Image (cartoon, rainbow, N blue to C red):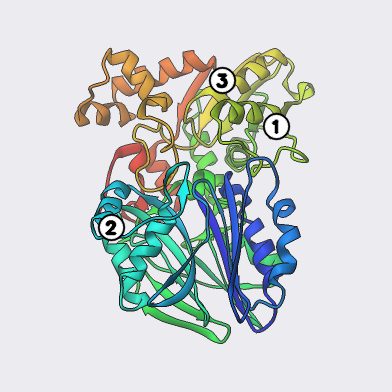
Amino acid sequence: MSGFFGCVSKRDCVADVFYGTDYHSHLGTKRGGMAFYDGKDFVRTIHSLESAYFRNKFEPDLSRFEGSHLGIGIISDMESQPITLTSHLGRFSLVTIGRIDNIEELTQELLDRRFNFAELSGSKINPTELIAILISLGSTFKEGIELVQQKVKGSCSMMILTTEGIYAARDKYGRTPVMIGRNADGYAIATENSAFANLDYETVGELGPAQTLFVTADGTQEIIPAGKKKQICSFMWVYYGYPSSYYEGVNVEDARYRCGCALALRDADIRDVDLVAGVPDSGVGHAIGYSNCRHIPYKRAFVKYTPTWPRSFMPQNQNMRDLVAKMKLLPNETFIRDSKMVLLDDSIVRGTQLKDNIVKLVEAGASAIHIRIACPPLVYPCIFLNFSTSRSTFDLFTRRVIKELEGTEDFSEELLQEYADPSTAKHAAMVEEMRKKIGADTLRFQRLDDLVKAIGLPKEDLCTHCWDNSSYL
């Protein structure tokens, strides 16, 4: 995942872009970047975030951008951004959010047409540069954006910084949000509208699927109208999103509260419980919903040590990521000792972190640990964003367990659907095996129909591919 922030203003907007981008630190762990047009030239800066905070890395650069009224910034889990390109459309800078599932095919198509690539990310083609080249193939920015939406399999939301304003375009099927804010001096564009409040912007709109606006300090002009088909990523509410943000009019924390309540309503047989706890950060909202709906005290059995271990300070090496995740969470033995508890988490991807958390609870004296997961088991790796895609299919805990139960890696779609269906014996056997491996007393996952109801949007407007491989497109 990644998050971006852009601003077009009648005054200097450097501070707004700096702080607005920083408010997206929970969405990325690898790279950060900003680009501004200062009235004469495009100036950009990119830094690694694997060993430092966004603010610490970028604050020394701010003086270079003074006086700029147009700027964009991004925090990314993947490639270096922004990309600045000179083309027949003029000079522009670009940031993108998404995943190009057919990047090899598009790369070869452009190489065959004798285009070349200058930017690399991990010795591979930089996806944002590829998008920049596709945009430049259009006779206008509108045509270029439409070409991207037509050719990219996966998803791509973007901002294009020009000398006159910013083109803001949402993914063809709206898989990631693009929000519009306004104040007396101009407009801002963000992935998370929670970034607006402290910068004195009012949320005034959200782009529809494929919708594209050209944003200036004086207003917005629709370049491409919104499409009718929408599949926004459900994980925006389950995990990615910041609690105070809204997407499609649905508040993140409120949806998590309802998720926890839905789990609680299916847990009537678990009666002898002393407390409910959540794995920080995203598990907390789910846990509070569970606690309130069952009238069981919510207590912070785990507290997160944030001064030196924020979300943005996460190395890409998986072993180091596991260590950092372990270092951040501190058990509170006062609440844990001799307690029977329900612990809520947003999801199980690899299973390693949750197993470590359970070990901590056992060592701190917990007498019973009931694990509740706010979404269904992840049966399918994501092909639209970068959630779980850096791992092989069998790095998914669910797939490893299915492989062990079936004794093969060769699964039919019918078999996977049987494991995904919570009413089947195979699903029950899979969950029981997962429970044994993580060491919980009980383990239950959210039902997909309950998750959809908790979010509050029609299922056909949500991407639920990770759980049921469905598509309404």
Q: Quadrant of residue 40?
A: bottom right
User: Residue 428 appears at what percent x and percent y?
Assistant: 36, 20
Mark 3 → mark 2, Cα distance in angstroms: 45 Å
Q: Residues within 10 Å of mark 1 (few under 14, many from 20)?
A: some
Q: With respect to residue 46, does 200 lie above or below?
A: below
Instruction: Decide which of 68, 347 is in the foreground and name it.
Output: 68
Q: Earlier in the sequence, mark 1 or mark 3?
A: 1
Q: Is residue 233 visible?
A: yes
Q: Earlier in the sequence, mark 2 or mark 1?
A: 2
Question: Of tags 1 and 3, which is closer to the observer?
Answer: 1
Question: Of tags 2 and 1, which is closer to the observer?
Answer: 2
| Residue bearing the label numbered 1 | 328
Secondary structure category for the residue under label 1: helix
Q: With respect to residue 37, does 273 lie above or below?
A: above
Q: Residue at x 53, y 84 (%)?
A: 219
Mark 2 → mark 1, Cα distance in angstroms: 44 Å
User: Residue 180 appears at what percent x and percent y?
Assistant: 53, 71
Q: Earlier in the sequence, mark 3 or mark 2?
A: 2
Secondary structure category for the residue under label 3: helix
Residue 470 falls left or right of residue 128: left
| Residue bearing the label numbered 2 | 110
